[in-house]
Image: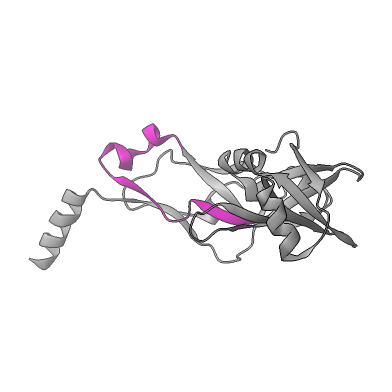
Amino acid sequence: MAGQIPDLIATVRTGTGKGAARQARRDGNVPGIVYGDGKEPVALNLNYYYLLKHLKAGRFLQTLFNLKVDGHEDVHVICRGVQRDVVKDLATHVDFMRIHDESRINLFIHVTFENHDKAPGLKRGGALTIVRPEVELEVLAGDIPDHVTVDLTGKDIGDVIHINDITLPNGAKPTISRNFVIANIAAPSGLMAAAEEAAEA
């Protein structure tokens, strides 16, 4: 589950519009904005390499941050978008939304699979086919799970794992009511070919 909320340091960006944003980029910053919670939006600058470090760490859009800006109270935020240069794929703008810990938000949460060695289907040469490496869940902002876990113990060839088959973290629920597929264990290619030949015969 979520641990300590990491800090994210930014400065207030003076001026608005494309000119101020271009100047921020020339100065080695990525322009951004924080909005929500019934307060006025605040234009921000984040150091490019500082932001890049956080982006490379992964799960940037799924992480609750403690935004620290000089002259402003610390506030919990979540990133709602990272705009990138279409050619260089470099971050050019970031949007943050203020939220309370008790707020419920929709996020894509990573799915991990464990106990591969306890799955008879995999031991027989079957392949784990992951349909959804992430699932969208409604979660409590102050308790965002790092991941959801699928236990493969006892899973055999032909078994299908649905969202209702796994235990979700407390307070989390799928945003889709349908019992959708997470993964399945497919037969080895040789076994599938033999089965197809037998069916044709």
Left or right, 123 with respect to 26, comes to left
- Describe the colour scheme in one phrase: one colour
Q: Is residue 161 visible?
A: yes
Residue shown at 80%/62% (left/top)?
Answer: 16
**Residue 83 occupies quadrant:** bottom right
* Residue 78 drawn at (x, y percent): 73, 51
Residue 117 in magenta stretch: yes
* Residue 68 drawn at (x, y percent): 82, 41
How many numbered discs sit on the rendered protein?
Answer: 0
In the image, residue 194 above or below residue 154: below
In the image, residue 100 above or below residue 54: below
Left or right, 72 with respect to 27, comes to right
Residue 55 in magenta stretch: no
In-front residue for pair 66/88: 88
Left or right, 153 with respect to 37, comes to left
* Residue 85 drawn at (x, y percent): 55, 58
Segment tinted magenta in the rendering? 114-139
**Residue 55 occupies quadrant:** top right
* Residue 127 drawn at (x, y percent): 31, 46
In-front residue for pair 142/56: 56
In-front residue for pair 27/190: 27
Q: Quadrant of the C terminus?
A: bottom left
In-front residue for pair 134/34: 34
In the image, residue 121 above or below residue 99: above
In the image, residue 190 above or below residue 41: above
Residue shown at 48%/51% (left/top)?
Answer: 133
Q: Quadrant of the N terminus?
A: top right
Q: Is residue 96 visible?
A: no
Residue shown at 77%/57% (left/top)?
Answer: 33
